[in-house]
Amino acid sequence: MGLSKPAAGPLLEIDRLSVDIRGEHGVARVVDEVSFAVGPRETVALVGESGSGKSVTSMSVLGLLPPRITRTRGSVRFEGRELLGLRSGELDRVRGDDIAMIFQEPMTSLNPAFTIGEQIAEQVRCHRGVSRKAARDRAVEVLDLVGVPSAAERLKAYPHEFSGGMRQRVMMAMALSCEPKLLIADEPTTALDVTIQALVLSELRALQERFGMSVLFITHDLGVVAEIADRVVVMYGGHLVETGRTAEVFAAPQHPYTEALLRSVPQGDTTGSRLWSIPGAIPTPEAMPDGCRFHPRCPHAKPGVCDADEPPLEPIGDGRSSRCVRREELRLSGIGGDAGGTGALAAEPLGGSVLPGGDRK
Amino acid sequence: MLRLLARRLLMSVPILVIVTFVVFFLLEIAPGDPARLAAGGQAASAADVAEARHRLGLDEPLWTRYWHFIEGLFTGDLGQSIFSGQPVLSAIAERAPVSLSLMAGALIVAMLIALPAGIIAATRPGGIADRVVMLISAGGVAMPNFLIGLLLVLVFALNLQIFPATGYVPFEQSPARWFQSLVLPSVALGVAAAAEIARFLRASMLDVLDQDYIRTARAKGIGVRGVVGKHAMKNAFAPVLTVLGLQVRILLGGTVVIEQIFNLPGLGSLTVKAVFDRDYPIIQGVAISAALVVVVANILVDVAYGYLNPKLRAA
């Protein structure tokens, strides 16, 4: 699929992953042929709005989707080993040990009925087979590491005795307790205050360097992406629309959706000016538009071109790929660089005046 | 945790006071004259009735008698049976083990059925196991316990002859036969509770299994038993405890019927006899004991609740 493979071979390889979810309105394909890889020590950001399929993609790696209503196809390989289709018992040896995961909702992701010490220690006991005492010591160690003050005394505390930021640190401590090779972080900072967000992010980065682990970071916040990710994978309507190195994607996006996302990030002094947002809403899997899935919301959409056939994800060299047929005509604008120029913005202003179905001039 | 316990104990004092009040005055306004009954019924002469009234202390003012009643409670003197003359306390002490064994047996039967049934149903909602559990439990809730009791006697006692149809063997006499004599009554009494608890556990479990922390537990790789048996169970069981507390009261009422069917010499059969005899001291004693059992059960439920839900411990 035209992705650059890191020299040592990827740690996690997702290949044509599709996820169907059975709901009230029948079966919906929420993830559609998604392929990307995460190399050793690499941080990859999976970016998209709510409903783009990014969380479902991340959950299917560890088989966390409810099996009764989901059907997963394709391949998810970790260190060359296929994870899809593994029995739950076999998957449990990978979960929490080789691959750990932290979630968006620190307030509800910890079990209210157990002390945090127990919640960390049970994972260590399970994967390392150590004594209760050793597991407890390990829990203190990792709580210390993520910056929970007086960790030894806090072991006996329950989640409700912690603030949101502290709970996310506890989640991180839990995830790191078995020194995973890959950490999947599903919007770990979204529910936190901005100041706590920055703290948790810098903590995460420091820990990543210390353990040498890879991170798959799921977020809709491009500000966060700029801060931590080596590469970006942009999802829209269940499939990939653009991939590439963070700096390059930010400087010169190759897909109008990426450009629109970048434009939605408030930058510098925005006092007095209205914050820009992408018009319209992300399509539901039941009502996926023909042609390019983004064209009804795209300021650059061209009738007869963009609403005809679904564009393929095309490699465009240097490990980048894009799913836009007008990519070469458009000169999309990014931020933090001038590789893409700003011509496109001037010629075809983005704005709220775009009609559903594209700009039919 | 100790504070929670102390608070609950303190709270139960006014409840018990109210119970004594209600028990005493309800019987006071009930129709029928115990003095006449004690003197020999309708045929007794006015003088005999007056004599019996004096002997039983029924000619004293109401409040004095209530005061004696309360005094008696604290000194362990609940009076004597009007008919047999046996002290009420010893009559209850004699019968209580039977009823308590029966209730404990019923609760054990209920949990043995409800726990696996509720969990299996909740882990595969809409599946065959779930449907079977829901169907049977609907029947279990709907079926009266005396009917279940009679069916059990018919099948297991009369046809298969595995268990005795009626009667009770004290534990001290033969533990094995004590156990045998309790199996059918416990099942008959426990089935409805099992159905009720299973349905509650299923609903509570379904709700809990949807929580974010269950996803976290699954992501930790601690296995299905750790996720369902430990993480989900501790949270899902709290609402079930409330039902369990209510069930104790229902089971207590159920013993009356079940003890009749299986001819068990428990508090239930004692009560039925006492009601027909208008043996007030016995009725009062049984009612107070029953209230005590319910209050104690509720305290246990609250303490267990505190264990399951750490947030309550501090409160």
Image (spheres, rainbow, N blue to C red):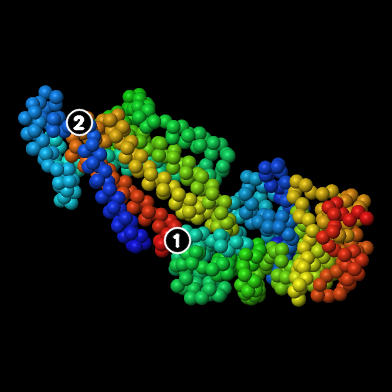
Asked whether, in this view, residue B92 is left or right of residue A205, the answer is left
Indicate the position of residue A81 as horizontal and vertical percent values: 68, 57
Quarter of image, res A221: bottom right
Asked whether, in this view, residue B182 is left or right of residue A287, the answer is left
Q: Which residue is mark 2?
A: B32
Seen at 85% across and 69% down, the residue is A333
Number of other residues with Cα within 10 Å of mark 1, as a class: few under 14, some 14 to 19, many 20 or more: some
Quadrant into which the N terminus of chain A falls: bottom right
Amino acid on which disc 1 is placed = Lys
Distance Cα–Cα, label 1 vs label 2: 52 Å
Lower position in the chain sequence, tag 1 or tag 2: 2
Q: Secondary structure at mark 1?
A: helix
Q: Secondary structure at mark 2?
A: loop
Asked whether, in this view, residue B207 is left or right of residue A346, the answer is left
Quadrant into which the C terminus of chain A falls: bottom right
How many numbered dots are placed on residues in this image?
A: 2
**Chain of the residue displaying label 1:** B
Asked whether, in this view, residue A357 is left or right of residue B315, the answer is right
Q: Which mark is residue B311?
A: 1
Q: Is residue B97 visible?
A: no
